[in-house]
Every structure is written in structure tokens, then in C-alpha cells.
Image: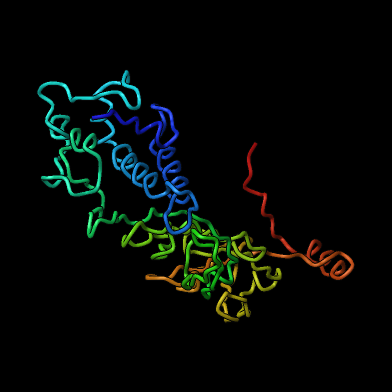
Amino acid sequence: MEYKDYYKILGVSRDASQDDIKKAYRKLARKYHPDVSKDPNAETRIKEVNEAYEALGDPEKRKAYDQLGANWRQGQDFRPPPGWDGWAQAGGARGAAGGGAGFSDFFDSIFGGGGMGGGRRRGGGGFNMRGADREGRVDITLDQALKGTEVSVNDAEGRVQRVRIPAGARDGSRLRVRGQGDPGVGSGGAGDLLLEIRVKPDSRYTLDGRNLYREIPITPWEAALGATIEVPTPHGWVNLKVPAGSQSGKQMRLKGKGLPGKPPGDLYLKLMVQVPSEDEAGDWYRKMAAESSFAPRAGLVP
């Protein structure tokens, strides 16, 4: 039988990373998919590409393949070395006995027949394989993360699809969209779309996980005497009780007022004392300076 250079088939070097191998496979699977390719040899090429990825996409199978040596060339007459017993000889697990996955005799001689990938079977003379997953990214606003939204994404064939992002989607979270990955071969189903969600920075709130943070300005007398003030939250206005003697920077927690979820996040409001201008309160400042015994620096030492 002829030796098959799976690295050459995928167009990658022998020291390619698993990620590079996966990217090369996805590119070729789209190029030679029988339903979209105009290449007259598309069916043959997609079988070669799938077989190569079956061998190299699994690190253990790749190790077994590499154990046969790098000195063989594509098309050379090949026989496994004496004592070789398929993938099991290299520490792997043999496939289902007797082949039947539509792969070549060369593949069966290395891995023992019967490909291990999900859903690869020959039925009625056709070759079936699930499509590869795709990865994508979508940027949404904080308001969209709070309430949920719909976004438009392109599927593997360039068609626009609407995807629902649920309320409470966190920055950096991933959403699996079933059936929106690369198309399958034969009766193999399409892969999935793994959509990374990024929440854009917001001028009002800082997002950390499901918790939200915001600064709230208060007057000196509200800080000194205490007060009940109305403050904004992502869920509407609420009354907040400011304790008497509050210092600038004091943090107040509103439980459950952050990003929705199980459990929901919290909203943390930092009280920031704002001082009126000298034009507005100059006389008041001078009277306080003359009459008050307050000395905040009295305890300082060099």
C-alpha cells in the first residue's frame, strides 16, 4: 500500500501545533465540501482531508503516526514494521474491528481500522462526517448584557443568522450555537458555533464578573448628617440611605442589582463627597474655618 503524508495533505509542517492543524482542516473542509465545491475531485479530496485530520487531530493518534518515522514520502510503498499492531501498539485504543469508516488501508494498518471520530461511518456507499466547530466573537453593550439581545452572525456558507444572547451574559463567556459551524459531509450534521461574548466598556458602570461598580456624588452635609438619596441602578432608581459621618470613598452594596444570573451580581456604589465652589459657598467655608475645632491632621506624624 502507499504511504500517506497526512501533514502534506493538510498543508502543515510536521511540527505544527494542534491549533494550526485544526485551522488547516477547517479551511480545507470548507474548500472541498461536496455541496459547495466546484472541484471535480472534491469528494476524493474531502475524504483525504478527513482521514488526515482523523490521524493528526488527536494527539495520541498523531504520536502513533509519527512513531513510524518522518523518512517516508507520499506514495512510497509502505508496510508497518514487524510487531506493529495498530494504534494499540503505540499506547492508544484500537478502533472498531474490521474498518468500515471509509478510510484507506494505510489508515487501518496504523490504527487498527474503524475511525474513532464522532459519527464517521460508511452507509449506502456514502461518507458521513460531522462538520467542525467554528469560533467567533461578538461585542455587545452593557445594556444588552443586562437585558439580552439578538445579534447577526455569518454561518459557514456566508449566510446571515440571528442569534439570541440571553440576559446576564458575562464578559468573556462563550455561547454554543448548535448547528452553525461547518457543514457536515454526507448525512453528518453541521458543527457548532462557539461564540465568545465581549461586553464593551461603559461610561457609567465598571463590570467585574456579574458585579457592577459606580461612583455616586454626595454633598458634604449629606455625608456629615446622613441622608436618604435617590440613586440610579441598571434596574431603575432606588432610595439609598447614606449613614451619618460617611467618608468619601465609602462603598455601599445593593444586593442583586448587578448582572442577572443564578445568583445575580451585586451593585457597589462608591460615595464621593463633592464640595461646592468657593463662589457658591465661600462665606460658609470661612465661617466654618473660624468657628470649627475640627482638625483631621492632628494625629499625623512625620
Quadrant in which residue 13 is drawn: top left
Question: Looking at this rendering, what residue extends furthest in the front direction?
Answer: 40
| Residue 223 seen in this snapshot | yes
Q: Would you say 270 lies left or right of 61 here? A: right
Identify the image's colour scheme: rainbow, by chain, secondary structure or one colour: rainbow
Quadrant that contains the C terminus: top right
Q: Would you say 176 lies left or right of 250 here? A: left
Quadrant in which residue 19 is drawn: top left
Percent position of residue 207, x then y: 54, 61
| Residue 255 seen in this snapshot | no
Q: How many marks?
A: 0
Residue at horizontal 54 percent and vertical 73 percent from the top? 149
Residue at horizontal 60 percent and vertical 66 percent from the top? 141
Camera-side residue: 276 or 190? Answer: 190
Q: Would you say 216 lies left or right of 1 here? A: right
Quadrant that contains the N terminus: top left
Question: Looking at this rendering, what residue extends furthest in the top direction?
Answer: 71
Residue at horizontal 13 percent and vertical 34 percent from the top? 88
Percent position of residue 91, x then y: 15, 32
Camera-side residue: 137 or 207? Answer: 137
Percent position of residue 185, x then y: 35, 56
Vertical side of 122 occupied by 115: above or below: above
Vertical side of 187 occupied by 86: above or below: above
Quadrant in which residue 51 is drawn: top left
Percent position of residue 2, x then y: 27, 29
Residue at horizontal 48 percent and vertical 72 percent from the top? 164
Camera-side residue: 254 or 169? Answer: 169
